[in-house]
Image: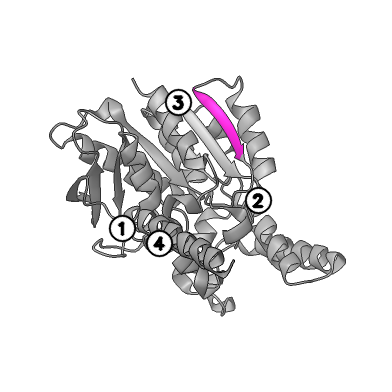
Amino acid sequence: MKKLLLFLLFILLIVGVLRAVDGLMDFDLDAHDVREVSFTVGDTVLSGTLVLPHNVDNPPIALTIHGDGPQDRFSNSGYLPIINTLLDAGIGVFTWDKAGIGASTGNWLEQTMDDRATVALAVRLAIADLDTIDIDQIGFLGFSQAGWVLPRVANEITPAFTVIVGGAVSWRDQGTYYNRVRLTTAGVAPAEITKQLDERIKNNDALFGGPIDQTTITDMDPDRLQFVANAYWEDSTDAIASMQGPVLAIWGEQDLNVDARTDATIFTEQLAPLSDQRSVVMVPNATHGLLRADLFNYQLPSDWPWYLEYLFIGMGRDAFAPQSLDQITQWITANVE
C-alpha cells in the first residue's frame, strides 16, 4: 500500500512538472516570427513587437489596446499566454509600450480617449505599411478601457475585426461599481457603502464639471488627475451602435472591475440585431481579464497573494477560464476572410 501511494505521488509530480513546462512555453515566442517595430505619432515614438505565426501567409493581425495603467507591450508578461493562443490559431499580434513606458516616448497620462483612438488608427496604418501585411486583415483586441477607444476607431474605419474584453461603457458608472466592490470586499456595511458612493459621485460630478483646481487635490498625482478629468464623462453607448465591421464584446461573469451584466446589456441593445459577426459573450467563472475566477479573481494584479504569480506562470493559458481564449480565436478566424 505504501509503495502504491508513493507511486501515485510520483505520477502526480511528473504530471505537475509536465503541465508547468507547458505553461512556461506559453511565455515564449521563439517558435514564431518576431519583429521589433517603432513608429511616430505626433511627437511620440511608440515601440512594439510584431509577432506572426510561423509559416502562415497573410494572417489576420490583432493590434492590442491596453487597459488602464503604465503598461508595457506584454503587460508585464500577462499577455503572452493570450498571444501564444492567437498565434497557434494562425493570428498575428502587434502590441506596443504605452507612451512613456518601456521604449516608447511621451506620457500616456496626457492622452485622452480621442488621442488613444488616433494612436490606434496610426498603428493600423504603420503595420499595413510593412511588407506582406494586408490592411484588410488588421483588427483590434482591446481590454477594459478599450471600451472607450475601439468604438471610436470602428466609427472611423472598418476593421477586419474588433474584440473588446471586459470593456467599460460609462467611466462614471464603472468607477462607482469598482468602488462598491472594493468597499464590499473590505466588509463595509451596505448602508455605509451607499452613503460613501453617493457622496463620491456628488463630489466628483462637481470636481469634473468644469476646470480643475489642482491645488485643492492633494492625494492624486497631477498628471493622473488630469487624465481622470479628461475621461470622467466618457460614455461609449452611442458609438457602439454605429461600430463598423465584426464586433465581439466579451466579459467574465465574475468581473470585479466592470459591471459586466449592465455593460453587456448595453452592447446587446446597441449592436442589435446580434449575429455571428456582432456577438456579446459572458464567460462563466471568469474574471475581468478572463482568468479563472476561482483562482485569480482580484481587482488588481497587485492584490494577488505572492504564490498566484508563480501559479499563473506555471499554468500559462490554462490559467484562463475554459474555452474563453478559444472563443476569441475561433470568432476571429470565422469572421476574417
Location of mark 1 (residue): 97
Mark 1 and 2 residues: CB-CB less than 8 Å, in contact? Answer: no
> Residue 205 location in percent, x, y?
67, 59
Q: Please give left or right for residue 114 compared with residue 41 in the image.
A: right
Mark 3 and 2 residues: CB-CB less than 8 Å, in contact? Answer: no
Please name which of the two marks, 4 or 3, marks the residue nearer to the observer: 4
> Which comes before the other along the chain, label 3 or label 2?
3
Q: Tell me the amino acid under the disc marked 3.
A: Pro
Determine the CA span between mark 2 and mark 4.
30 Å
> Which comes before the other along the chain, label 2 or label 4?
4
Q: Residue 215 occupies which quadrant of the picture?
A: bottom right
- In the rendered view of the protein, which quadrant contains the C terminus? top left
Q: Secondary structure at mark 3?
A: loop
Range covered by the magenta-colored residues: 277-282
Mark sitting on residue 33: none
Mark 1 and 4 residues: CB-CB less than 8 Å, in contact? Answer: no
> Which comes before the other along the chain, label 4 or label 3?
4
> Residue 13 location in percent, x, y?
46, 64
> Which comes before the other along the chain, label 3 or label 1?
1
Mark sitting on residue 246: 3
Location of mark 2 (residue): 254
Pick the residue in front: 22 or 125. 22
Q: Tell me the amino acid under the disc marked 4.
A: Val
Residue 314 visible, this angle: yes
